[in-house]
Amino acid sequence: MAAVGAPPPRASDCVTKVALTISCDNLLDMDAFSKSDPMCVLRMNTSGPHWYEICRTEKIQNCLNPRFSKSLVLDYYFEVVQKLRFEVYDIDTENCSLEEADFLGQMECTLGQIVSSSKLTKPLVRRDRTPAGSGTITICAEEQTDNRVVAFEAAARKLDKKDFFGKSDPFLEFYKQTETGWQLAHRTETTLSQIQQATQSYAAEFECINSKKGKKKGYKNSGVIIIKQCKTVKEYTFLDYIMGGCQINFTIAIDFTGSNGDPKSPRSLHYINPQGYNEYLAAIWAVGNVIQDYDSDKMFPAFGFGAQIPPTWQVSHEFPINFNAANPFCAGVEGVVLAYQQCLPQVKLYGPTNFAPIINHVAHFGRQALQQQTASQYFVLLIITDGVITDMDQTRSAIVNASRLPMSIIIVGVGGANFEAMEFLDGDDGTLRSATGEAALRDIVQFVPFRQFTNVSCCL
C-alpha cells in the first residue's frame, strides 16, 4: 500500500505484494499496575528525511511478548531500497494516540533485508539509536501474489464445417468475467491435426452452441469441446527462490577503457574528484545499495576490464580491482568503493572494451552450480560501462551460452554515449542470437541507462 504523500510507484517497476507478521519479546514494562499494551507502527522512507506511516498492528493488552495477528501488506520493489522503521509503543488511550503513548523502541531495516532472510530478528533501540534497554522485534515475510496458472489441454470433435472448399480452421477463445463484463483472456492456436489426433477418453466434454442456430428446430449443437487436461501449476518468482534459501552471488565489473576519458579531467566519467564523486562511483553506490541486501555474506568480487595494469602494463579484461587474484572479494559496497578509488590511480585506461571474458568468468561458477541437485546458487554479473563495446560477436555467444545457467547480467550505462549496443544485448525487442544464429534460452540481460533512471537499478 502507498503512504499518503509518498512518491507513487512507477508502472515499470517489478512489484510483488509481501505480508509482514510481527512479534516482540521482553518489552519494557511502562505501566505501574499492569503490563504494557503494545502496538507496532510501520513507517517507510524512500528518499530524503521524511518517514511516512504505512500501517499499524492492533493493540494487545497487558503483554510484554506480543504476537500481533494483523499482517502488514506492502508493495515490494526489488529495484528500490525501501527503508522501513518499526516503532513499538505502549498505548494508553482508546483512540491509540501516539502523542499520549509511551515509546518502547524502534528498529530500522530495508524490506530487501527482510525478504532475503524471510525472518529477521533485531534488538529495539531508542530514537537516538542507543539500546532501548530491553526488547527484540521479529519480522517474518510471506509473498502474497498468487502466481498459480491453469494449464489446459483441449480438443474438439464434430464441429460445424465453415469453409466452402475445405474443413474449418478452429480455435478456442477463453474469456474471464470482470466487473464490466466478459473480457478475452486467451486465444488458442489449436490446429485441425491436433483435433483429429484427440483420443476417445476425455476428462470433460461441453457442447459447442451457436447462438444463431439455437432456436432452430432439431438443432443440438455445433460440435463438442473436450478438456483433456486441466491442472493448476505454480510459476516460481524471484521471491520464491530468495525465501526458499537460494543464495544470490553478485560480481561487479567496471569499465576502465580509454573512451571514459582521462581521469585527471573533470569531464571524465572516471574523474578523480577531490570531493570523491564521479559517475562510476554514483552507479556503484546506487546499484550496490540495492543488491547488497540479497547477498548473504555481502562479499563482492569486483573486477575491472580494458586497462593496462602493473607491473607488466599489459591490457587485462578481468583483473581484480584490489589486485588480489587469490581473493578478489570486497567487503560490502563500501569495500568496492574503496578498492575502486585505490585502483583508479594505479591503472592506465586503454582498450578495447571486451565483455565476453568477464561474462565467461562468472558463467564458470554458474556451470559449477548447475551440477548441484538443488537451486541453491544464482549468479548476477553487474557491468558498469560507458556503452562502447568491441567484441560484440563474442559477447553475444557468451550471453547465449550463459542463458542456460543460473545467471543474469545487469548492464548499467553511465555517461551520455549511444547505448544501442547495450539495448540490443538486452533482448527486449526479440530473442538474442549468437553470430552463428543460436538463440538464447531465456532473456538474462537487463540494461539500465544510469542518467535516465538515477533512482532505479534493475529487475532480475
Image (cartoon, rainbow, N blue to C red):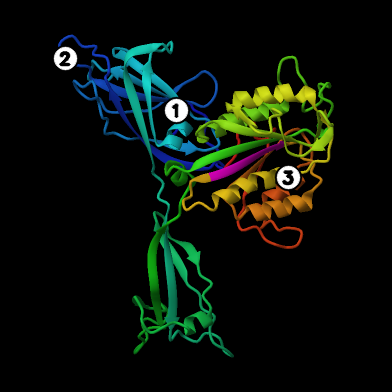
> Which quadrant does the N terminus fall into?
top left
Answer with mark 3 or mark 1, whichever residue precedes in sequence.
1
Q: Residue at x 43, y 68 (%)?
A: 152
Position of residue 365 measured from the top left corner of the image (x, y, whole percent)? 60, 46
How many marks overall? 3
Q: Is residue 45 visible?
A: yes
Residue linked to disc 1 = 4
Which residue lies most toward the left here?
Answer: 33
Which residue lies most toward the front here?
Answer: 326
Observer-side mark, 3 or 1, equals 3
- Find the distance from the CA under tag 3 to the CA under tag 1: 48 Å
Query: Is residue 379 in the magenta section?
Result: yes
**Front residue (pair 101, 432):** 432
- Determine the image quadrant of residue 220: bottom left
Range of residues picked out in magenta: 378-384
- Find the distance from the CA under tag 3 to the CA under tag 2: 67 Å
> Does the CB distance between marks 2 and 1 fall below 8 Å?
no
Q: Amino acid at mark 3?
A: Pro
Position of residue 190 measured from the top left corner of the image (x, y, whole percent)? 51, 75
SS type, badge 1: loop
The 10 Å Cα crowd at callout 2, few under 14, some 14 to 19, many 20 or more, is few
Q: Is residue 209 visible?
A: no
Answer with mark 2 or mark 1, whichever residue precedes in sequence.
1
Image disc number at residue 357:
3
Query: Is residue 287 in the magenta section?
Result: no
SS type, badge 3: helix
SS type, badge 2: loop
Left or right relative to 97: residue 161 = right
